[in-house]
Amino acid sequence: MIKQRIGKIINEAVKNFFRKPATISLAKDKIQIVKNYRGKLVYDPANCTGCGMCVRNCPAAAITIVNEGTKEERKMKATLNVGHCIFCCQCVDSCPKKCLSYSQNIDLASFNKEELKMQL
Ligand code: SF4
Ligand code: SF4
């Protein structure tokens, strides 16, 4: 019984040794991203009223919107912590002005936690 199992394991190991890897190298291989894939958020401040709906509805507290200008002359800035974002689309759906959308940018990994907080 044990011999049979060991035989199966060895068989499987030998088969897998000659198989192509199931994973791809992000650095080397070009990957096809499907339409509507949720990559890094994109923010268009042009119509942003600073209502804060996106911030309030974010379940991961990943997005912040601040007005760095004045009440009369707004200068809206959005910051996203991609380490927290779960790409749920809630902020995109919540925005009454359609200021948020998704890009196909998936190159978001970093060894530095601070770099995960990015301006949109
Ligand atoms: S996609 Fe979801 S988790 Fe990410 S910022 Fe928007 S609401 Fe928050
Ligand atoms: S929900 Fe839209 S309009 Fe409101 S603060 Fe967020 S991005 Fe701006």
Image (cartoon, rainbow, N blue to C red):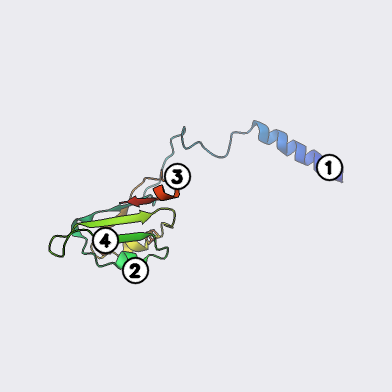
Cβ of mark 4 under 8 A from ligand 2? no
Question: Could you tell me how far apart the alpha carbons at marks 1 and 2 are, in whole angstroms?
Answer: 59 Å
Q: Residues within 10 Å of mark 4 (few under 14, many from 20)?
A: few
Image: 75 above or below 57: above
Q: Residue beneath label 4, please? A: 66
Q: Quadrant of residue 57?
A: bottom left
Task: Name the residue rendered at 26%, 56% in the picture.
Answer: 77
Front-lying residue, 83 or 2 = 83
Q: Which amino acid does label 3 sit on?
A: Ser
Q: What residue type is labelled 4?
A: Val
Q: Which amino acid does label 1 sit on?
A: Gln
Q: Of label 4 and label 3, which has the lower sequence position?
A: 4
- Residue 33, image x, y percentages: 41, 44
Instruction: Give yes or no for contact between labels 4 and 2 (Cβ–Cβ under 8 Å).
Output: no
Question: Could you tell me how far apart the alpha carbons at marks 4 and 2 are, in whole angstroms?
Answer: 13 Å
- Residue 19, image x, y percentages: 63, 33
Question: Could you tell me how far apart the alpha carbons at marks 4 and 3 are, in whole angstroms?
Answer: 25 Å
Q: Residue beneath label 2, please? A: 56
Question: Could you tell me how far apart the alpha carbons at marks 3 and 2 are, in whole angstroms?
Answer: 27 Å
Instruction: Give yes or no for contact between labels 3 and 2 (Cβ–Cβ under 8 Å).
Output: no
Task: Name the residue rendered at 55%, 39% in the picture.
Answer: 23
Instruction: Give yes or no for contact between labels 1 and 4 (Cβ–Cβ under 8 Å).
Output: no
Q: On residue 108, which mark appears? A: none
Q: Nearer the viewer, mark 1 or mark 2?
A: 2
SS label for mark 2: helix
Q: Residue beneath label 3, please? A: 110
SS label for mark 4: strand
Q: Of label 1 and label 2, which has the lower sequence position?
A: 1
Q: Residue beneath label 1, please? A: 4
Q: Which of marks 3 and 1 is in front?
A: 3
SS label for mark 1: helix
